[in-house]
Amino acid sequence: MRERPLVRASSAAIVVVALSGACTPSEPVDEQPSATTPSAGPPSVTSPAPTAPPEPTVAPDSGAFRVTGQRILVRPPRSGSFRVRGLYPWRPSRCVDAERPTLDGRYPGTLAIRAVDDGTLTVAVTLDFQAYLEGIAEVPPTWPKAALEAQAIAARSYVLARTGWSGGQGEDLGTPICGTADCQVYGGIPQPRPPGMHRWYRAVRQTRGQVLLSGGRPADTVYFSTSNGRTYGNDEVFGSSPLPYLRPVVERDDGASPVSRWQVELPVRDLTTVLRADGAWPRGVSIGSVAVEGSTVRLAGDGERRSIDAGSLRDAVNSWAACLLPRRYPSDGLPVTIPSGWFALASVGRSLVVDGRGWGHGVGMVQWGAYGKARRGWSTERILGFYYGGLRPRSSPEPGTMQVVLATGLRSLTVKPSGLGARIGGMELGSGPLEITGGDEVSVAGNGSG
């Protein structure tokens, strides 16, 4: 990311806004890691009770079939996978150039597609635990070995802590976890495979069974992208009881991050558009001036005067700037318009200038800091010990298989096996696509193997 020059103004008022909470981006910057989002417990996804999948009804001669049921299991070809494309229901949007969100990825393992009460679909995949870790899309695979291994151990510890794992080696992990940034991002099998991906796979293999433990249990090893020069205690950010391994540390090694320091300029015409949409400024009136007083932004124009606190301003800008002004925001390759709550505001002419640092919630390992430390020769163990209160990797049992909820609220799915041998119930499928829709039940249409 190219850093913009600082805007200087002799009369600018400055306010520093403290960290206001967890910041989890929905779209990562290229070559940027993604942050975990801690919560009070495991994610609120439920695993449906196992049911025997229905046998498909096959049309005579044609090989075509349709199968329906509340829950359909689709098993992959031997050592194979599925390309999965999912559509969400179309909803009216005020956004310019609004696009319907989609699910698009390649996943190993058995797919479970379930119909829910509103007629939409939930899709989950049951897969080997190692395959799950290989599909964690958190940091670039070209990073130094020690940083990749620290990320692999943190990701392994995190999922075991969040799912309450206490089983023996190779047992199934019964509690599902989501595959989005609300947990940790599971990207499946990358298509196309990025350069250096074998290095990430090697880091996962070489750290197999290594977990950070606290009190004999997997530690809740949250992490985030880039700091403002320090990290924070879990109690400071999430309001949970202080954990001895999630204490504040000073960060000096994440300066290579493209969001280490950033600046955003918001002209009054753009503020008018954004704050009208958010309901914080009246329609039909333009903002003429902006001033900063402490943690409050004062707006005036055409006889109207309004005030908004810095945190609410950030929320409004992040909700509406990219939506209504997509050709201008986010600027300079930022993940979101205002990436963190660590920023200063200045009134400069007819613009509000935001100077900030970092991206993420601020607790646990700083991924770009791990990168910097690895570049300086730190070992995997030293990196993890620095961020997690001196904890060191220990051998611990791993699950054999686990379930990841890929998406909820889908309208339809197209699922294509990687080859022959996929099955629904006792029927072997061809290599063509399966068309899956929701409603009162899941409906799957496709062709048998012939």
Image (cartoon, rainbow, N blue to C red):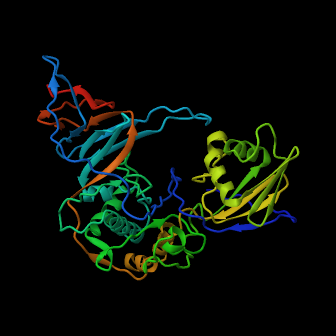
Q: Which residue is drawn at 60% across and 74% down?
A: 229
Q: Which residue is drawn at 44% across and 33% down?
A: 89
**Residue lying farthest top?**
61
Asked where in the image residue 149 lies, by quadrant, the reply is bottom left
Seen in the image, is 13 located left or right of residue 436? right
Indicate whether 268 appears above or below 196. Answer: above
On the image, the x and y values in percent for residue 154 come to 38, 68
Asked where in the image residue 97 lies, by quadrant, the reply is top right
Q: Residue at x 58, y 60 (%)?
A: 258
Q: Residue at x 82, y 63 (%)?
A: 8
On the image, the x and y values in percent for residue 294 come to 77, 67
Indicate whether 41 appears above or below 305. Answer: below
Is residue 189 something that shows in the picture? Answer: no
Quarter of the picture holding the C terminus: top left
Q: Is 135 in front, or is 110? A: 110
Seen in the image, is 359 located left or right of residue 292? left
Q: How many labels does the image show?
A: 0
Q: Is 297 in front, or is 131? A: 297
Q: Is 355 in front, or is 277? A: 277
Indicate whether 235 appears above or below 311. Answer: below
